[in-house]
């Protein structure tokens, strides 16, 4: 089932990319493996999954050690509490969820002490929902020059989660707004900030996200089923 699901998702990613005039290879699929057994992760890996996403730092660290796959990328996609930063331990290729300047500063300080550089995305609360983590667009713009000076992290792009909606078309405006925000940030030409990546789109709306410029999609249920 997992192999067939993964094949179907990849096919739909390719179709959405081509319809948007994009190269399917420019879109990275992160298989969201939270609450997924190590056995099923290995099954997905054997079927062609190259990147996996976890949302709880301590559980993820244990799972990464248990699975012990050397040629995959691990992404952290959940809310990262400041007191859990010590568990990063160079295990994650990319953190999607840096949702405040203070968190970025803590991560940067830790990474400098370990003589490493952590790749991160900045989480933006495009919808303005109080229940969502992330910076408001105005906060991001105001603080971007400070982010650029942090030496222990390298900012690669932005991430957002739109409001839950059964109609994927209703997510389009939020994806579009994130892309436009990224373009505005890039126009500032700040050293130390690249912003090439847009992490947006999950099982219910990833095709729309791709049409709006997503470079990373986070897919769990469509690959592993409901958990």
Image: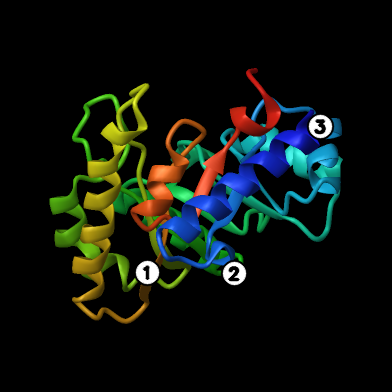
Q: Position of residue 30 (x, y in %)?
A: 60, 47
19 or 136, nearer to the observer: 19
Q: Which mark is residue 40?
A: 3
Of the image marks 1 and 2, the number of the one nearer the N terminus = 2
Q: Position of residue 141 (x, y in %)?
A: 17, 60
Identify the residue at horizontal 20%, vertical 76% (top origin): 187
Identify the residue at horizontal 56%, vertical 62% (top origin): 24
Q: Nearer the viewer, mark 2 or mark 3?
A: 3
Mark 1 secondary-structure assignment? loop
Structural distance between the alpha carbons of marks 2 and 3: 31 Å
Of the image marks 1 and 3, the number of the one nearer the N terminus = 3
Q: Residues within 10 Å of mark 3 (few under 14, many from 20)?
A: some
Identify the residue at horizontal 60%, vertical 51% (top origin): 29
Q: Which mark is residue 150?
A: 1
Of the image marks 2 and 3, the number of the one nearer the N terminus = 3
Q: Quadrant of the C terminus?
A: top right
Q: Answer above or below: position of 18 versus 47.
A: below
């Amino acid at each position: 089932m997992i192999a067939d699901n993964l094949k179907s998702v990849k096919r739909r990613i390719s179709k959405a990319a081509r319809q948007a005039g994009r190269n399917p290879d420019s879109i990275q699929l992160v298989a969201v493996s939270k609450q997924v057994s190590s056995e099923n992760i290995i099954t997905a890996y054997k079927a062609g999954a190259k990147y996996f996403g976890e949302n709880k730092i301590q559980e993820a660290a244990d799972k990464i050690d248990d699975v012990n796959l050397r040629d995959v990328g691990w992404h952290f996609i959940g809310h990262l509490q400041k007191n859990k930063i010590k568990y990063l331990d160079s295990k994650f290729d990319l953190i999607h969820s840096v949702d405040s300047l203070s968190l970025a500063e803590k991560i940067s300080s830790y990474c400098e002490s370990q003589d490493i550089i952590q790749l991160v995305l900045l989480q933006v609360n495009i919808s303005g929902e109080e229940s969502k983590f992330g910076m408001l667009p105005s906060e991001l713009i105001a603080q971007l020059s400070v982010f650029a000076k942090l030496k222990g992290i390298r900012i690669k792009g932005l991430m957002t989660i739109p409001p839950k909606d059964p109609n994927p078309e209703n997510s389009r405006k939020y994806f579009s707004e994130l892309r436009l925000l990224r373009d505005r940030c890039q126009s500032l030409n700040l050293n130390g900030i690249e912003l090439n990546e847009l992490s947006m789109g999950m099982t219910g709306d990833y095709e729309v996200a791709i049409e709006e410029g997503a470079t990373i999609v986070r897919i769990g249920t469509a690959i592993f089923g409901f958990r």
